[in-house]
Amino acid sequence: MFFNALHRIYTGFIGPPTARKQDDAIRFGLLGASNIAPIALVGPAKSHSEVIVAAVAARDRSRAEAYAKKHGIPIVHSTYEDLLQDSSIDAIYIALPNSLHYEWALRSIRAGKHVLLEKPSCSNAEEARALFNHPLLKAKGAPVLLEAFHYRFHPAWQTFLTRIHRDPEAGQVKNAFVQQYLPKGFCPNDDIRWRFDLAGGAMMDFGTYTMSCLRQIFNQEPTEVLEARFRGLLTPLPDLQDAGQIDQAMNASYRTADGKTGTLLADLSASGDWPLLPNSWTKSLPRLGWPKCEVELEERVIEDTDGRVHGVKRNVTMWNHLAPSVYHRVDVEDTHTIRVGDRVVKSWKESKKEKAYKWPSCDIRANDEQEWWTSYRHQLNEFVNKVKGREGSGVWVDGDDSIRQMEAVDETYRKAGLLVRPSSVFKL
């Protein structure tokens, strides 16, 4: 198992095989020399025969040139607009600061380019509605636009959802909890995540994942934010604009129209809570641990005859949904109870632990995927399928989904007493 994990990590993130490129491969341009692009696109593209990362543009040309040399990107453009006007480029990957997503997604679409857009799609719901409902995206043959919630595309996440929504022994979702955090010290004080004018904050970073997870678990939209508590910056820089509006961590609870409840915790500077040690000893130390989703389902009656009732109550936990190719596990625990009237006659538990590094061979979605494929590689595969007009796995994030996502994020900020992130002045 250890060597399998090493193989997945090395092949998926460090040394993916280089595929022979097809003549009609999609040629990507990168807007920005970002830290995430090598993991999210450059690496996955190497093993995809229909994708070439062909160009990059950054605010600083010398930085773009160094980035291109490091990652084997043949073309460097001096400006973002020059990249959009490059007729050899078919698609744009946008990993700019959040506040620039709306403008450069629209500019890319206007230039006729497909767009893979890093989350969050926009700074707020108003921008999301303007972007995803724009006439340019409604026209025949419009470019493909995808908000890059990569975790959704991995078979592990879909297996997790199956155990909640599509398994015959699963009841209705009752309650859910999702947590993701970065260890204290990971983000320096001058990180752009702490800039309100750049649409920063925990809810705009890891919080977007936790919110997306809850919405997927609910299988509907939350109608009420029950509570939202944030931790602000402990030592903001003196010149940090609107530092009081930045959430370093967010803890929020929600309810749906039919009574489902859920809680998210997103922390970009987590400390303490080490296992087996008093928190007083570890509260100043960086916190370590896997991202986690826990779901409690209502009891489902599977047999009701002659006053004898057999019910099953399920709990499902997914560990490390964010990087499942490194390691993940889906824990399913079913508590069976047999009652006669109000009397419990028998009770027992059945547990199983599952992993899904690729689609099962019997699944119609199974194709040529490998166990080392990262969630980003699965996402890229579906992006290509959409551009090429192929059916694919059926997993997607459509425009309405992205709009509702930002509406939920905005409502969380309002409930917490914080301002919604500011809109761009760009108009098209």
Image (cartoon, rainbow, N blue to C red):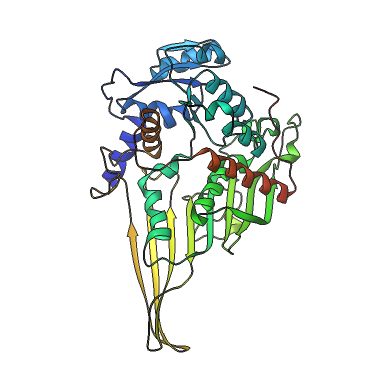
> At 70% from the left edge and 43% from the top edge, which residue is drawn?
234
Residue 338 vertical placement versus 197 (above, below): below
Residue 40, position as x, y percentages in the image: 43, 32
What residue is drawn where x is 55% and y is 20%?
110
- Residue 20 image-quadrant placement: top left
| Residue 271 in view, yes or no | no
Give the number of marks: 0
Relative to 350, is 232 on the left or the right? right
In percent of width and height, residue 217 lies at 49, 55
- Quadrant into which the C terminus falls: top right
Give 46 or 155, whichever is nearer the viewer.
155
Question: What is the x, y in percent for residue 199?
Answer: 66, 34
Residue lying farthest front? 140
Closer to the camera in the image, 423 or 66: 423
Image check: 237 left or right of 85? Answer: right
* Picture coordinates of residue 144, whole percent (x, y): 46, 29
Relative to the observer, which residue lies in front, 49 or 44?
49
* Residue closest to the eye, 171 or 65: 171
Residue 353 at least partly seen: yes
* Left or right side of 346 for 277: right
Which residue is pictured at 31% across the width and 29% down the height?
15
In the rendered view, tell whether residue 74 sits above or below residue 145. above
